[in-house]
Amino acid sequence: MKSQQPISSSRHASTLDRAALWLILLLAFALRVYRLGAQAIWWDESLSLYRATRDLGTVLANTILIQNVVTTDTLPQCYFIFLHFLVRAFGTSEFALRFFSVIANIATIPLVYALARRWLGHAAALIAALLGALSPFYVWYAQEARPYALVLFWSTLAVYALTRAFSPVIARSVPSASSGQALSGAAFFPGTAHQGRCAAKSKDRDEATPKLLGDCFAESTLSEANVLAMPNGCWIFAYLLAAIAALYTHYFAIFLFPFHAILILIFVWQRSIWRARAWIFLPALPFVSVIFLFRQVLASAASNVGTGPSFVAPEVILRDLLNSFSIGITMDWALGAWFDLAMLVLFLIGIGFPTSNFQFPASKSRFTLILLAYISIPIAGVLVLSSARPLYQNSRYLIAISPAFYLGVAAGIAALARGWRPLALAALGVFVIGAVLSLNNWYFDPRFGKDDHRAWVESLRERARPGDFLILNSPHAEELYRYYADDILPIATLPILRADGKPSPDADLTVVRDAYHNNARVWYLAMDVPFDDPDRHIEKLLQQEGILLDHAQFAGTSTEIALSLFVRALPMADARDIRYPLDHAFDGHLRLRGYDAPASIAPGARGIVKLYWQIDEPVGEDYAVSLRLIDEAGTGVGQWDATPSGNRSGSSTWESQRIIVDARAVRITVGTPPGKFRLQVVPYHSATGTALGEVVTLGEIYVAGN
């Protein structure tokens, strides 16, 4: 019975590990689905929407039609093929578009755990899984409808498959030199016992194993004769599949292929037969598959000449990666620097003092070498190619190397635990605190969120009128506009694009003039995509041909979003055309000459109220006006405050003695009881809120029943 206690204890520990891993995965899932659809999709995600909602042939062709110009997407097809079928099953809501990324990122965490368990042991494996689960960097890209979570999954699977394929496998029939008892492969690597059983069935394969490995293992003496020379074929196939899938998900996956060769080299170098070392050329097979992407890579590069990323200094790249992997991209740099430093220290401890689970001589140094190569080789590849043409945009492009960072940090925490466990808990606590602060910013602080496209849609929907028109700058954002606002106004996208990349100023001017001529008002939505209109040519044309009435900025972390209102001429009126004339003088040389209002408005509907203003002499400020709807008891049921005409054409720009038309869209709240309501108005100083006179009651509006 005593001989069964170690086995029982091992099984109990394994059960606890599995339970802990499931809890970590549940935590990761909760963090990633929480507020998954709360933020609007941004421009990049709208490109995913475009590709996913086109026919499969267009997805495979890797093209995007912008106006009438066929462009080649900068990302390959794999992710969009999956998304193409998923949106047909689950729709195109923000939640549905992003959920595939959630699943891909969740699936990566067990791979990080499995890698850490094979390279470091079970304690570090659970820590690494927890780091991945809490990572704000992972949460961000799990909540984005882009390929980054998927390329992370494929790339991590490729590294894990190589580890499984080339890990030393111990033949069950070979006795230990120290104990004389049979050893299972599972005694060294959990999960490899089936490989040992396969080896024991083949006497010829045992005879083909090399003669001598060299030095002794830490706990037992094993000769190279115990290590099988042939890798596991199933895991070789899994590697090829994952590596090719990674490349067809994001082109930057190719920078990991040299690391794959180094990883194989570390596994097989001390095997004495040349056939084992020849496996270092295995990554050449997925590399060759790039030939099928070559044409679209060239087409994409050609279409982005002069508009791609600028050169980024190596130290900036390293700082960006460290910050992203440590606490994500949702924390102020000043505060985040301290967490970055703490994580860097833990990483250095991890690669300096690891507890390696490798079954090799000098396995600790090999772990250090592998981890450094995992991180540095792809970065070096990007830097080398950037000398010819800049490639690096931000940390998401190198998300595939992030598992190496979490493995190093986990190794560092495990190393501290060997010396003094409270110190290890404190180190883990630093990461947890940083993650909580960063995630709180991501969930609730607009400064760190995605571009707020819902805000401009709400503003446009509230203020647009029949007969209005919208010019969208840029054409690349048309899918985004149609996703949120396709039912509001007809649009034209400018500037006019040409296949040769040259501008079309005459065609742009024609569209602007037609918009002014055929429509009462022209809205201008600028997404500030730099390669569409970097000189703001369209905005200059609108100002040249018309007058800017109003301008509003909306929150955007990647794009400057502005919504402006233009008219051909400032709206003016003749006193004889005013339906309800008045002549009420306010302070500040301001005079109300009359108004026009509908007799009734239904709840939930809008009505246009026109106020007619005049200044007796020029004024030096833009007054604001409060329009209110009051019930019979004197209780307000609606209030609309704004600068007459607009915040770019206020009273400081008016000519004296001219009557200016201030048209207001008044929406009656759903649920407002039917009855008669009084319309009141009062102007005030916009800077101080001080009224320019008494409140004036204009007339009555009847609110109809529902």
Image: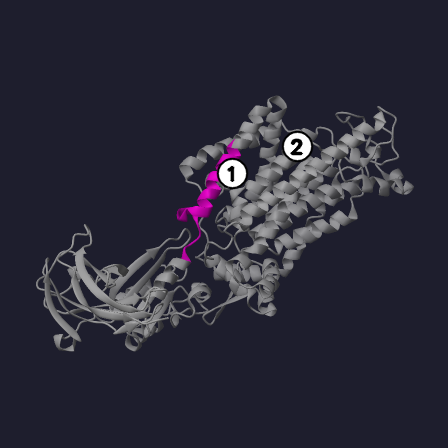
Residue 612 is situated, as x and y percent measured from the top left of the image, at 17, 69
Q: In the rendered picture of this protein, how many numbered marks are placed on residues?
A: 2
Residue occupying the far front of the picture? 633
Q: Secondary structure at mark 2?
A: helix
Residues in magenta, as a range: 430-453
Q: Say few, some or many: other residues with alpha carbon within 10 Å of mark 2 (under 14 / 14 to 19 / 20 or more).
A: some
Residue, x 86% and y 36% (percent of image)?
172
55 vs 446: above or below: below
Using the image as rendered, state which of residue 564 and residue 155 is in the foreground.
Answer: 564
Quadrant of the image occupied by residue 162:
top right
Lateral position of residue 315 relative to residue 664, left or right: right
Residue 630 is situated, as x and y percent measured from the top left of the image, at 24, 62
Q: Secondary structure at mark 1?
A: helix
Identified by mark 1, the residue type is Ser
Residue 10 is situated, as x and y percent measured from the top left of the image, at 76, 32
Quadrant of the image occupied by residue 228:
top right
Residue 398 seen in render: no
Say which mark, if any, is on residue 326.
1
Q: Look at the image and say whether residue 93 sits in the magenta stretch.
A: no
